[in-house]
Amino acid sequence: MPIDNASDPKCAKSLDNFNRLGKRDGTVDVRKKGQYYITTVVTSSSSTFDLLVDTGSSYTWVGGREENPYVEGYASHPTPQIIDAYYAGGLVHLRANTYRDLIVLDGLNVNPQEIGVPVELDGFPARLDGVLGLGPSRLNSKITEDGTVIPTVVDNLHGQGTITSPVLGVYLVPANEANTGGGGLLSFGSVDTSVLTSDVRYVPVTQTHPASEFWGVEASILYGNEQILSPTSGILDTGAVRISVAGDAFMAYQAATGAVMDFFDRNRRLTITQDQYNNLQPLSIVIGGQSYDLSSNAQIYPRASPDAQIFLVITSLTDPGIGFKLGSTFFQRYYVVFNSANSQIGFASHIHTESTSN
């Protein structure tokens, strides 16, 4: 939609700066502070926001911290839409007004993008300013009052010709390495082959509801040689940290590893001894006949020291109808490509698949 005041002489210099900031290669740096985020500039007001990288939702919103609010600028265009969204199994609630504005994703122009600005926000991490929604646009029909499907950032980049294909490649670096350097890369419109150590293998997005609404696939899961989760549908969600599995699979994994629940831990994580860690078997997610193995190191949280308590990244899933959720700990070991044009998801090993940095 045309920006009403784009021809205003007062805006010319700012728009020129916006165009010079942009780049067309589609590569955006990811950073990490607890969770993975990218820095986004709302150009009309020169405001900067750190947004959660989230393939489990599709709407982009900013201004989640009182000390860093969204400020209307020369290109801000209010829309009548109201957003009402829940995240993290209902633990986070957003109600937002909406605007069209000019945004830059670490140098990549999106002109314009509809964004939400909270009027109510409960349960969202205070260290971040909002969410970069990278899931399928069909999810947005669930959070608008009239069922409108709002284009995502990927849709708009493709629609404006900045990228040739509606493709997103996600590369995340394991936590300890991300804390001392870059957190990874988002590749809009392409696959970053420089970080891959295998070919990309594609599978169709599942047609099984409700995973079909998300970036969902069919998979089974093995611990060692034992199948703990029969073939079922699940989703890929960078906005989540852990790898969550249905209750029966969780209990089978806990029994096979000998792990116990730490009820003093606020997240109720599974914990194991050093001897149990030494005996951990690979956890294999089998997608499209290909096994994506997680080593013993990939199954645990980073430790502050070699003597620190060992927590596992596997947790029980309570989302009805979904068999598993692969959070950012899976992406730390495997590159994932989301192709909305072909309704496919691709997987490849990357340079940290066998990392022992945790």
Image: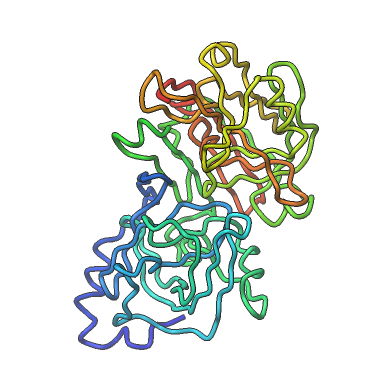
151, 72: nearer the viewer:
72
Give percent across and percent down for residue 309. 46, 25
How many numbered markers are drawn? Answer: 0
Question: Quadrant of the rendered structure where residue 201 is?
Answer: top right
260, 28: nearer the viewer:
260
Residue that appears at 47% across and 72% down: 116
In which quadrant of the rendered image does the C terminus lie? top left
Q: Is residue 239 above or below residue 78?
A: above
Give percent across and percent down for residue 241. 52, 42
Q: Is residue 355 above or below residue 321?
A: above
Horizontal placement of 267 versus 146: left or right?
left
Residue that appears at 63% across and 16% down: 281
Question: Quadrant of the rendered structure where residue 230 is?
Answer: top right
Residue that appears at 34% across and 70% down: 66
Colour logic:
rainbow
Give percent across and percent down for residue 326. 61, 40
Residue that appears at 47% across and 29% down: 196
Give percent across and percent down for residue 243. 60, 37
Q: Is residue 7 above or below residue 58?
A: below
Horizontal placement of 275 versus 36: left or right?
right
